[in-house]
Amino acid sequence: MKNVDQLQSVLIRKIDSFENESGIIEYCNELILNKYRRFYTITHPDTNKIRAWQAHSQESKCFVPLKGRFIVSWVKIDCFKNPSLNLKAESIILDSTCKKLVEIPKGYANGLKALEPNSELLVFSEFFLEKSLKEKVRFDSNLWFNWNKYD
């Protein structure tokens, strides 16, 4: 039988909407919020900044587009002390007008780049800040993914 940690994978979920005379409600009934301890927003005023790679051996994250568009990428880390250079990153464009969210489980590195000025993401984090900072590992943004193809 496989270890539970081995079964975790990145999940992409649709954000649905409902509209009536009172307004519009956007929702995702499949997102389990009780595992998250905090949230924050990331705003990129321009499209030049690459925020990569942040890796978490123990913490999962969830990214939701609020404004504009981001390319969000992730890669499963094989060794947090010395990862392979040939790991395969995957990605999705998160767009605030065609909403989806992405849940990235522990054991992955994530990175992102705004595709429109002033794009904004909502991020749910499984750990409080102090614990998150202690287990986070950063890797060079030039590894695993060609961010330049989104210039």
Image (cartoon, rainbow, N blue to C red):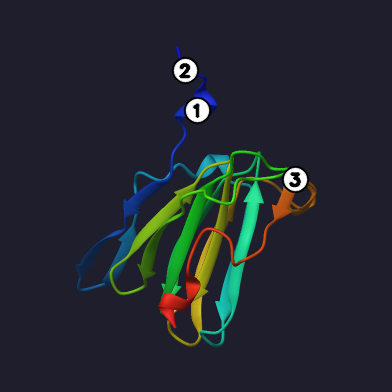
Label 3 neighbour load within 10 Å: few <14, some 14-19, many 20+: few
Question: Residue 103: horizontal and vertical position, in percent?
Answer: 46, 49
Pair 3/2: label in front: 2
- Determine contact: label 2, label 1, CB under 8 Å: yes
Question: Residue 3: horizontal and vertical position, in percent?
Answer: 52, 19
Q: Quadrant of residue 126?
A: top right
For marks 3 and 1, the one nearer the N-term is: 1
Q: Disc 2 residue type?
A: Lys
Q: Disc 1 residue type?
A: Gln
Secondary structure under the numbered disc 1 in the rendered image? helix
Question: In the rendered view, would you say 80 is above or below 52?
Answer: above
The Cα–Cα distance between marks 2 and 1, rounded to whole angstroms, is 7 Å
Question: In the rendered view, would you say 45 is above or below 98?
Answer: below
For marks 3 and 2, the one nearer the N-term is: 2
Q: Disc 3 residue type?
A: Glu
Residue identifier under label 2: 2
Near-viewer residue (108 or 105): 108
Label 2 neighbour load within 10 Å: few <14, some 14-19, many 20+: few
Secondary structure under the numbered disc 2 in the rendered image? loop
Secondary structure under the numbered disc 3 in the rendered image? helix
Residue identifier under label 1: 6
Q: Is residue 134 left or right of residue 53?
A: right
Q: Is residue 92 left or right of residue 73?
A: left
Residue identifier under label 3: 135
Question: In the rendered view, would you say 81 is above or below 112?
Answer: above
Query: What residue is rendered at 49% in x and 72% in y?
Result: 147
